[in-house]
């Protein structure tokens, strides 16, 4: 029995290995037949690492590498003939692809036996990178010197290409920052005015959170620069591209309601004591009652915030929205008369509670502005999504 089970498992394992090997080999062949020569080289090389004598993988690698090499060199030659604006994009892409193929084959001894004349691309790739760095850096600098947002955005594209090749090339970090600044919309976020005759409430925390969100989540990867009025003044920006005004149309803090409720409770079949019947002790059952006087204090704080984005140069409004927010604080307590056994655990817990003082007005203000903040930042994020 054990021998039969062992033989069955062995057959299954061998079949599984055969299927995996067949799929690995055929997948390289399928890629080759679809004209995906780079992928076919990668798959065949992987197969030969596992099975160095696999004839099908050798054949796929030989044919796929020959055509991959021809495809990339043809693309480079064509780009060199026409010398279009994206010349370095094309040559770098193709030389990098050839470098990846070269490295894949070099680290596969069985592959080196198949590919006898491996194309050495290291020197040409390094030279192309150096030429591309100089070209993109100079063209970006020339664009930046011309001035204007359109040219600054072109400069930023070229500078980012420099960073992708060599992140520490010359003063590229400074150049990227300068190009992004000049390419970006300058947006002033005005302070949120507060007009409350009843409470002395600060909205400093809300302003700070909104600014932090704009800096970290929107400005980080879009062509926008958010500034406070003070920052705009320091930068001598007399007319920003946009102005964001955020203010409360109205808000109420600490509107209090108290609700009182009186209710009777009764519970049957409660053990009242014991009695002796014919020499045996037995429980005596009866009904118990209790009355509860309960209170519920509700403190409601709410407000309606107005979000407006305007464009000073055309005296036009780009966006206006009303954003509501509400927070309700609740306190429940009570007391009872009668037999506590008539009450549930929840009712007993209610009667053990005491009246609590509501949070301070500043805390209530913070709570009802939390949903406003969530909606407002989401709307700003959506509005500036296309500023890339």
Image: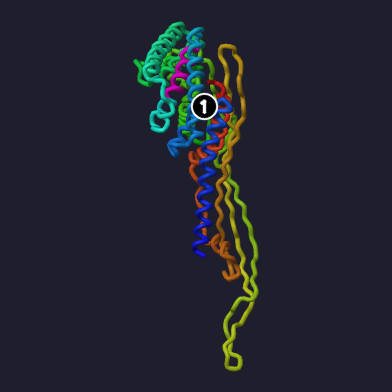
Is 167 left, or right, of 65 in this rendering? left
| Residue 279 appears left or right of 208 | right
Asked whether residue 93 is drawn in magenta, I would say: yes
Q: Is residue 65 above or below residue 315?
A: below
14, 171: nearer the viewer: 14
Question: Residue 249 falls in which quadrant of the image?
Answer: top right
* Majority SS type along the magenta span: helix
> In x, y percent, where is residue 344?
59, 65
**Residue 259: image location, x then y, percent:** 62, 52
Instruction: Please provide percent x and percent y for residue 204.
Output: 46, 31
- What x and y, as percent, mark residue 379? 58, 29
Residue occupying image coordinates x 40% and y 27%: 103
Q: Which residues are drawn in magenta? A: 86-99
**Number of marks present in the image shown:** 1
User: Which of the pair 176/43 is nearer the observer?
Assistant: 43
Residue 324, quarter of picture: top right
Report helix, strand or loop for mark 1. loop
Choose between 386 and 129: the one closer to the eye.
129
In the image, is residue 320 above or below residue 157?
below
**As displayed, is residue 10 above or below residue 219?**
below
Q: Which residue is mark 1?
A: 193
Residue closest to the far top? 146
Q: Residues within 10 Å of mark 1 (few under 14, many from 20)?
A: few
Could you tell whether 200 is left or right of 34 in the image? left
Q: Residue at x 38, y 31 (%)?
A: 107
């Amino acid at each position: 029995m054990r021998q039969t089970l062992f033989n069955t498992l062995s057959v299954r394992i061998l079949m599984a290995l055969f299927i995996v090997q067949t799929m690995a080999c055929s997948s390289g062949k399928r890629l080759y037949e679809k004209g995906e020569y780079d992928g076919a080289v990668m798959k065949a090389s992987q197969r030969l690492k596992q099975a160095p004598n696999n004839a099908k993988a050798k054949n796929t690698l030989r044919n796929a590498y020959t055509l991959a090499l021809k495809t990339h060199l043809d693309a480079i030659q064509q780009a060199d003939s026409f010398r279009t604006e994206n010349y370095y994009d094309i040559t770098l892409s193709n030389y990098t692809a050839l470098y990846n193929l070269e490295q894949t084959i070099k680290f596969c001894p069985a592959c080196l036996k198949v590919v006898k004349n491996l194309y050495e691309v290291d020197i040409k790739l390094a030279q192309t990178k150096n030429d591309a760095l100089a070209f993109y850096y100079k063209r970006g600098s020339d664009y930046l010197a011309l001035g204007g947002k359109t040219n600054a955005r072109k400069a930023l594209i070229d500078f980012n290409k420099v960073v992708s090749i060599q992140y520490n090339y010359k003063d590229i970090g400074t150049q990227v920052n300068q190009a992004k600044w000049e390419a970006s919309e300058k947006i002033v976020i005005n302070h949120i005015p507060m007009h409350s005759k009843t409470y002395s409430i600060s909205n400093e925390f809300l302003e700070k959170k909104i600014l932090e969100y704009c800096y970290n989540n929107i400005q980080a990867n879009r062509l926008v620069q958010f500034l406070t009025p003070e920052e705009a003044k320091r930068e001598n920006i007399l007319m920003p591209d946009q102005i964001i005004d955020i203010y409360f149309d109205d808000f109420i803090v600490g509107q209090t309601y108290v609700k009182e409720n009186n209710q009777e409770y009764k519970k049957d079949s409660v053990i009242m004591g014991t009695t002796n019947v014919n020499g045996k002790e037995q429980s005596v059952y009866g009904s118990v009652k209790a009355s509860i006087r309960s209170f519920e204090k509700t403190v409601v704080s709410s407000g309606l915030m107005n979000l407006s984005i305007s464009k000073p140069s055309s005296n036009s409004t780009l966006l206006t929205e009303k954003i509501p927010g509400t927070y309700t604080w609740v306190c429940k307590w009570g007391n009872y008369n009668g037999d506590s056994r008539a009450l549930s655990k929840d009712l007993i817990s209610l009667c053990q509670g005491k009246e609590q003082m509501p949070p301070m007005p500043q805390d209530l203000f913070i709570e009802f502005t939390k949903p406003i903040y969530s909606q407002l930042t989401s709307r700003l994020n959506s509005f500036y999504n296309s500023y890339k």
